[in-house]
Image (cartoon, grey):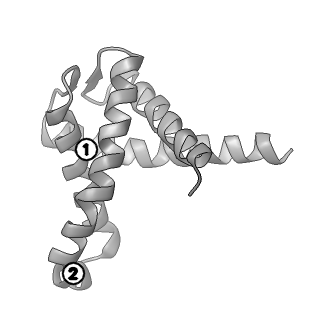
C-alpha cells in the first residue's frame, strides 16, 4: 500500500466517522480534527490488535459465522478507539459500538465506491 493510498484510507475513514457522529447512532465526535485522530487510532488498532484477536479466536471464528465474529472484533476496536481518544464518545456503550461499527462499514464502502467511480471516470 502506497503512502497516497494510506492517506486516502485515513481521510475516508475520518469522514465516515464524522458522518456517523452526525447520525443518531450514539457516537459523538466533537469536531473533524478529533475524527482525524480517531481514524488514525482506529487504523493503528486494526493493524496492531486485529491480528492478535484473529489468531487468538480462530476456533471461535470457525464455529461461529465469520461475519458475526468480524463484527464483534470491529465493535471492540471501535470501543477501544473511543476509549483512547478524548472527544470521541459512545453514548450508549455496546449499542453505540454495534451501530457505529455497522455504519462505518457501510459508509466506508459507499465512499470508496463513490471515490472509485469519480477517479475512474
| Disc 1 target residue | 78
**2 and 1 marks in contact (CB < 8 Å):** no
Give whichever of 52, 100 is nearer the camera: 52
Tell which residue pokes out farthest to the front in this image.
3
Location of residue 38 (image quadrant): top left
Location of residue 81 (image quadrant): top left
The label shown at residue 58 is 2
Q: From the viewer's perspective, is residue 25 above or below residue 71?
A: above
Which residue is at a point 37% across and 36% down the rendered structure image? 39
Secondary-structure class at tag 1: helix
Q: From the viewer's perspective, is residue 113 above or below residue 60?
A: above
In the displayed structure, does residue 47 sit left or right of residue 113? left
Query: Which one is earlier in the sequence, the residue at label 2 or at label 1?
Result: 2
Secondary-structure class at tag 2: helix
Location of residue 85 (image quadrant): top left
* Quadrant of the drawing holding the C terminus: top right
* Residue 25, image x, y percentages: 30, 30
* Quadrant of the drawing holding the N terminus: bottom right
Tell which residue pokes out farthest to the top in this image.
31
Give whichever of 107, 84 is nearer the camera: 84
CA distance for labels 2 and 1: 20 Å
Circle 1 Cα neighbour tier, 10 Å, few/some/many (<14 / 14–19 / ≥20): many
Give whichever of 85, 69 is nearer the camera: 85
* Residue 111, image x, y percentages: 59, 40
Which residue is at a point 14% across and 43% down the rendered structure image? 94
* Residue 57, image x, y percentages: 16, 75
In the displayed structure, does residue 95 sit left or right of residue 11? left
Which residue is at a point 36% across and 14% down the rendered structure image? 31
Amino acid at each position: 500500500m502506497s503512502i497516497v493510498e494510506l492517506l486516502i484510507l485515513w481521510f475516508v475513514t475520518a469522514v465516515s466517522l464524522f458522518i456517523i457522529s452526525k447520525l443518531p447512532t450514539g457516537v459523538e465526535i466533537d469536531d473533524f480534527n478529533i475524527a482525524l485522530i480517531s481514524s488514525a487510532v482506529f487504523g493503528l488498532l486494526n493493524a496492531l490488535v486485529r491480528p492478535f484477536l484473529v489468531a487468538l479466536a480462530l476456533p471461535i471464528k470457525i464455529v461461529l459465522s465469520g461475519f458475526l465474529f468480524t463484527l464483534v472484533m470491529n465493535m471492540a476496536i471501535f470501543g477501544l478507539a473511543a476509549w483512547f481518544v478524548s472527544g470521541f464518545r459512545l453514548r450508549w456503550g455496546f449499542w453505540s459500538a454495534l451501530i457505529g461499527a455497522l455504519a462505518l462499514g457501510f459508509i466506508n464502502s459507499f465512499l470508496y465506491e463513490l471515490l472509485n467511480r469519480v477517479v475512474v471516470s
